[in-house]
Image: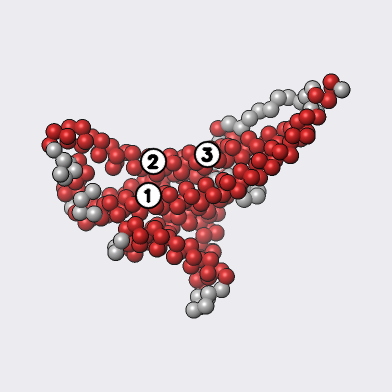
Amino acid sequence: MRSFFIASSPGFVPPSTNDFNLPPSIGDSPYSTKPIFLVFLSVILISAFFIAASRKAAVVPGKLQFAGESVYVFVRKSIGEEIIGHEFMRFVPFLFTLFTFVITNNVFGIVPLLQFPAMSHVAFAYVLAIFSFIVFHAVGIKKQGLIKYLSGIAFMPGVPKFVYILLTPIEIATFFIVRPLTLSLRLFANMFAGHLLLLVFISGGHYMLTNDHLLLKILSPFSFAMGIGMSFFEFMVQCLQAYIITLLTALFIAGALADEH
């Protein structure tokens, strides 16, 4: 009986950051990795979906048109109009593109055969944060002028002058360092941690199922079940993170449009 409870296979090797460093698919080119292809695939899928949804637009929408319009209306009203206000329409294309791009690349993490969220590579999250950074600062500079905009950041109105010694460096760091970092790292960290957690349960279940240890074989379905359950939870997180990065971008734009920020 003792042989049933002694594993003869090597010990379980848990997932690590190495599982996110995927090798090139074509030769040695660093631009032919799976995350790169997934990003291009997301652009193709998003474009094809919304072109198909709007090609035969009707007063009474079909299922495809309804789905496309629902996503657009959600971003337009729930994020653009409610957060930015009366000037929201000119920012809807950017917010809509940001939301659909992020959510598509996030959901890739639980799609069979793809199963990798592109945003778990921090470089993609950094690029999105840079775009948002450029947009909301450009908006503020265009509306208020460079000097007034920068002075509004460095010297908050209504504050005693001696407080500027402490407040000015904090405000400058917040607007030019903290904001883009929080946008990118929040998205990256959630996608990275979620995917790593799924890897732990699925690879752990596979290890237990193929192990000679009888008890591990019995427990393996529970690991797979946790992996499946976590996939549903991860889907909610993926959608939520797409919403949060779009919402924060809209909030930053609204702040840049304000006379005082």
- Precedes in sequence: disc 2 or disc 3: 2
Residue 112 image position (x, y, % from top left): 65, 49
Q: Is residue 177 above or below residue 149?
A: above
* Mark 3 nearby-residue class (10 Å; few <14, some 14–19, many ≥20): many
Can you tell which of label 1 and label 3 is closer to the viewer?
A: 1
Identify the residue shown where x is 24% and y is 54%: 258
Q: Which residue is mark 1?
A: 248
Q: Is residue 96 visible?
A: yes
Residue at numbered disc 2: 182
Q: Secondary structure at mark 2?
A: helix
Within the image, what quadrant is residue 4 found in?
top right
**N-terminal-most mark, 1 or 2:** 2
Q: CA distance from mark 1 to mark 3?
A: 20 Å
The 10 Å Cα crowd at callout 2, few under 14, some 14 to 19, many 20 or more, is: some
| Local SS, label 1 | helix
Residue labelled with disc 3: 192
Marks 2/3: CA–CA distance: 15 Å
Disc 2 and disc 3 in contact, CB within 8 angstroms: no
Which residue appears farthest toward the left when viewing the image? 161
Which of the 4 image quarters holds residue 209? top right
Question: Do labels 1 and 2 touch, CB within 8 Å?
Answer: yes
CA gap between label 1 and label 2 equals 10 Å
Tell whether label 3 touches label 1 (CB within 8 Å): no
**Label 3 is placed on what type of residue?**
Phe
Tell me: 250 left or right of 165. Answer: right
Which of 119/195 is in front? 195
Q: Quadrant of the N terminus?
A: top right
In terms of sequence position, does the residue under pointer 1 or pointer 3 come before the other? 3
State whether residue 109 appears in this view: no
